[in-house]
Every structure is written in structure tokens, then in C-alpha cells.
Image (cartoon, grey):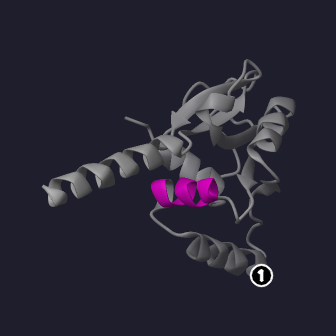
Amino acid sequence: MKKITHLLMSLTAIALMRNALAELVVIVNANSGINKLSKTDIVNLYMGKSCKFPNGLMALPIDLKNSDIEKAEFYSSLTGKDLPEINSYWARLHFSGFGSPPVQAGSMDDVLNIVSENKGAIGYIDRKKIDKRVKLIYIVNPLP
């Protein structure tokens, strides 16, 4: 009986933790002309392999600070890499002169504001923060 009680408590705790996590979504400016991007398109933009959206618009990827758990979740979900691997990747590219990492924003609210004010900006935020100034184009980690 104790094992069943312990198991139920553990499952409940896991469910509550999952609900506390943000449902990360990728957003663009509402006037960008972008309606949807594939996972590959997003990875290419955030890893510096592409600098334009499929419609030709120059892209401005916006990132969160390294200390944000959502940033780790974003890169892990899309690339399968952890933040030290991502930071190492960008350090190599930047040092060799082949690219610069995405612009870092201080918070999800900052990401929302930057994307809403720049037609070519792309960012990721908690789905709950979306407003009419931006358009959801990809769900990173759908919640059950």
C-alpha cells in the first residue's frame, strides 16, 4: 500500500511540474507574411544556417538569456543539444567570423515586444503571453 501511495504522489508531482512549465511557441510579427515554419526552418534560423525566411524577408532571431530554463528547453527540443553545446557552437562560428548568435532578450516580455516591433523578428515565448501583435507559427513543446 505504501508503494502505491508513493507512486501516486510521485506521478502527481510530475504532472504538476509539467503543468508549471511553459508551453513554448515560436512567434513572428503579425505583419511578417509568415504563417508557418517547419522545425528545420526554425533550427536553420537559430543556428545561423539561414538568414532569411522562406518568403525572402531577412530574419532577426531573438533568444532568451542562458540562465532561462526555457532557452534550454527550446534548444533541446529543436536540436537535441544542451546549452553548453549551443554556446560552444556559436563561439566557434563567431571566433572564425562565420556568424553571430541570435540577439538576446532579457525576458519573454522583451521577446514579445521586440518581435512585435520588428517585421523580420522571430522569437519563442510561453503560449500564454501571445497577443494580437504576433503570430504563432510553431509549437515547440505541446502540453498534454
Q: Which residue is mark 1?
A: 95
Image quadrant occupied by the C terminus: top left
Where residue 95 sits, quadrant-wise, is bottom right
Determine whether 11 is above or below 68 in the image: above
Residue 101 in percent (x, y) is at 74, 64
- Residue 37 in view of the camera: no
Residue 132 on the magenta span: no
Residue 78 in percent (x, y) is at 49, 54
- Give the residue drawn at x 56%, y 53%: 74
Image quadrant occupied by the N terminus: bottom left
Determine whether 48 is above or below 137 in the image: below
Outermost residue on the left side: it is 1
49 sits left or right of 2 in the view: right
5 sits left or right of 60 in the view: left
Outermost residue on the right side: it is 117
122 sits left or right of 43 in the view: right
| Closer to us: 116 or 23 | 23
- Amino acid on which disc 1 is placed: Phe
Residue 69 in percent (x, y) is at 61, 58
